Image (cartoon, rainbow, N blue to C red):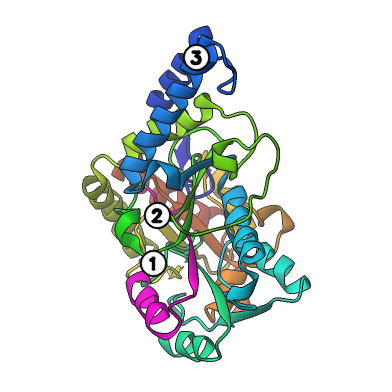
Amino acid sequence: MIYFDNSATTFVSDSVRAKLQELTEDAVSANPGALHKLGNRAIEVYEGIRRETAQLLGAKPEEIFFTSCATESANTAIKGYMSRNKRAGNAVISTRTEHKATLECLEYLAKLGYEIRYLKVGMDGKPTAESLEEELGKGDVALACFTLVNNETGSVLPFENISKTIRAVSPSTAIYLDCVQALGKMPIDLSKLGADMCSFSGHKIHSIKGNGVLYVKKGVRIDPLILGGGQQDGMRSGTQSPVLAGAFLAALKEVTTGIDESRGKVKEINDYLRKELSDRGARILSPDDALPYVLNVSFEGFESETMLHCLEIYDIYVSTVSACSAKQKKVSYVLLEMGVDRKTAANAVRLSFSRHNTMEEAHEFIKCVDQIYEQFLVR
């Protein structure tokens, strides 16, 4: 099997499996809110995991909150900030190439009467500096929402430039950043990044599904999305799970070790596939400076779903659009927003890699593409 669909989800690592077994033992399975010694032990373990997670991300422990997923983190950050800071402004700026978790939150805010201003993006998927300055210049911007690495193309946001512009033109504007596809693939130090709120997902870094993290910079006030017993400093109620938090930490430790080495290995795979597929007439849609973990490519003569199922015959797994939209069988809104014509976008397939993929798999992939062309392409 060749699995090139790691942006959708990753396989669970051995270290995470081991941590799950350790944290489901009876000695640490009590409710962390209980007053007895088993409860005290559970909360001690939980807070230790929180401290370690914060340290690896360059944050303070009180800035880290464990959630069920990045979608929950996004909802909490975006809705929670606008709800709590009504005097900060009535406008939000973003782009139409964001993940659905962000876009649906923005549509929700629009229905409440907030003004959503979408920036123009170039053919590389990055918001233009002119559009950013223009929308900020209109004033009244409470929040800016962006994605550090686009999940469909791998386009890397020039966040340092964007944050400098926002701080210069509209210093009171808070920034939410989706860091899901960047985690473990590029260095992230939240103390230096410059974002006020960030979301992360466990199952994108070889943890299990059902765990994520929300970062909220100290001093930033947001309303909680989930109410109840006031756990996690009132930010996210519900019985704390040392198991899920520990699974996230185990994965985080693994993917933050040897980032440069892993990226170099994946870049070799990406560069090889870019050349070989281009030589066969495919069109590369990911920008040249995209993070190498994602390669979006359009196969002339094959609609995306057709190519997906042809590859599946050879036990190769890729995706068409984001997994959150795939079953709706729509053309990628990200590619269309970048100016890709609809026919090309309709033939687009996303290959996404992890540190565990190999050049041998890349060679086999090209071999199978040649066989698919020979068998199915009508010239």
Answer with mark 3 or mark 1, whichever residue precedes in sequence. 3
Task: Tell me the number on the disc at residue 156.
Answer: 1
- Which residue is the site of mark 3? 28
Front one among 159 and 1: 159
Q: Which residues are magenta?
A: 159-183
Question: Residue sitting at 50 percent across and 43 percent down?
Answer: 65
- Which residue is the site of mark 2? 182
Answer with mark 1 or mark 2, whichever residue precedes in sequence. 1
Q: Is residue 246 left or right of residue 363?
A: right
The residues bearing labels 3 and 1 have C-alpha atoms spaced at a distance of 40 Å
Whether the residues at callouts 1 and 2 have beta carbons within 8 Å, the answer is yes
Q: Is residue 160 left or right of residue 180?
A: left
SS state under label 2:
loop
Residue 102 at what x, y percent from top left?
61, 62
Whether the residues at callouts 3 and 2 have beta carbons within 8 Å, the answer is no
Q: Is residue 76 left or right of residue 264?
A: right
Residue 199 at what x, y percent from top left?
50, 52
Which marked residue is nearer to the observer: mark 3 or mark 1? 3
